[in-house]
Image (cartoon, rainbow, N blue to C red):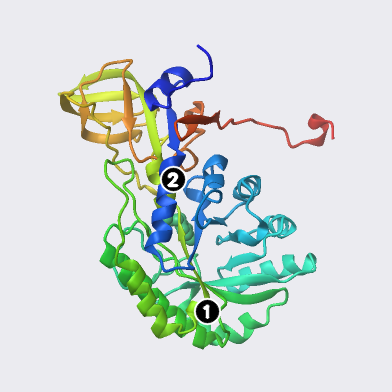
Amino acid sequence: MSDRTTTTDPEDLARRYGTPLYVYDLDRLRAARRDLFGWLPDGFEVFYAFKANPHVDLVRALREGEGPACKAEISSTGELAAALEAGYPGADILYTGPGKTPEELNTAIGSGVRTFSAESLTDLEHIGAAATRHGTVADCLLRINSAQASATTSIRMTGAPTQFGIDSETVAELAPKLREVPGTAIAGLHLFSQSNARDEEALIGELTHTIEVAAAIQDDLGVELRLLDIGGGFSVPYAQHGERAAYPKLKAELEAALDVHFPRWRQGAPRLAVESGRYLVGDSGTLVARVSNVKVSRGRKFVIADAGINTFGGMSGLGRLLPVTVSVEAGAETEKASLVGPLCTPGDVLGRQIEVPVLEAGDLVRIPNTGAYGPTSSLLMFLGRPAPAEAVVSAGELVSVTRIAHVRTSLRQEDTGE
Ligand SMILES: *Cc1c(COP(=O)(O)O)cnc(C)c1O
């Protein structure tokens, strides 16, 4: 077979390149980007959270082409390398995370990153020390852990004791110190209180509340904000059938809240931003796995596939193994079975007693909406299996097919000959 395949059908690609295989469709990713900018007031910026999927072809597509470009929200030097490779200028990168080390701050600033989310006074001091070493000043968004939040959401990240952000009730007292950290300028605020808000009312409630909180914090700080990142929560099904959420009322509600709390926002004071990972990439991905075996245990059927929590099941480290749904071939008969992976642990379950086609060893199964929190949030190294292959397609053409490699290297100079 020639490598110049004319088909971008996931199962054809799986037969050619092997399984497990992710196929990401850039057309869908571009549609998600267009929709997300469309739900927001004009002029809003969108930071793409690289942790959802740092594949360089995907992050490049979020920056290039028609329409407003995404900026990058990263939190490691690995994600920094992906952002730089994909062409994001330092000015379009926001560096976040609760445990930034001096080495990574040094690398980030040396690469031209100038905007950081600061999670505490000491984090701000670390950023300032690195910036000073480079003879520059870092623009810092203070990440705020708001005392109250407004809506019910699936991952609540504020209001409780946490490693994230500065407790909102302490800002007024800390303000003189926060304003004086050498090598830093307080450029704005960063609030991220929720993930995956399926319900539009909940999302609107949370984001408008965030705007209100930010206005109060601005007063406590005594600094005029230049950039306000209100977080996100934009939702897409995770390995389940279904469509990305729609937010038709969001734009008007955000505009109304901003007119009250930041009357000069339409003149860019402050600039406004949201962050999103899953919404932008989630529905671009399809995971194709091959069935290795089918067995029955005490009356229950188990479909054993070559993709397990080493391939998918992002957040498995957080005990957040979410059920997946296998797409059913049209007209196919279905039955109940557990879809499990190949690993020697009973935790390797991708779906317990779910509806699956009648399968046998050698069959392919497709799991939809797997573009976010796939390979890089899975237990890739566990049990020494190769990482899944990842194919990228665009406008009916195959763009790339790659696999992440794990390589053990020696750190001793005498072994490396340095
Ligand atoms: C994880 C994360 C995101 C992305 O969340 P999604 O639910 O994928 O949109 C955005 N911002 C921060 C600070 C995060 O930690």
Q: Where is residue 414 in the image (x, y as percent from the top left)?
A: 83, 32
Q: How far apart are marks 2 and 1 (CA)?
A: 30 Å
Vertical comparison of 372 with 7: above or below = below
Name the residue type under label 1.
Gln
Label 2 near ligand 1 (CB < 8 Å): no
Residue found 67% across the figure and 58% down from its top? 90
Amino acid at dot 2? Leu
Measured as percent of width and height from the top left, residue 251 is found at 36, 69
Q: In the image, what residue occupies the spot 39% across and 70% down?
A: 160
Element class at badge 2: helix
Residue that protrudes farthest toward the right in the picture: 418
Q: Which mark is residue 267?
A: 1
Quarter of the image where ligand 1 sits? bottom left
Q: In which quarter of the image is residue 116?
A: bottom right
Task: Tell me residue 62's x, y (percent).
Answer: 51, 49
For residue 29, the mark is: 2
**Left/right of residue 246 with respect to residue 54 in the rendered view:** left
Q: Which mark is residue 231?
A: none
Looking at this view, is 255 or 18 the one in front? 255
Disc with the residue nearer the chain's start (2 vs 1): 2
The residue lying at 57 percent from left, 42 percent from top is 56
Q: Is residue 310 shown to the viewer in this render?
A: no
Give the number of callouts.
2
Q: Nearer the viewer, residue 99 or 115?
A: 115
Give the residue at x 27% y 24%. 303
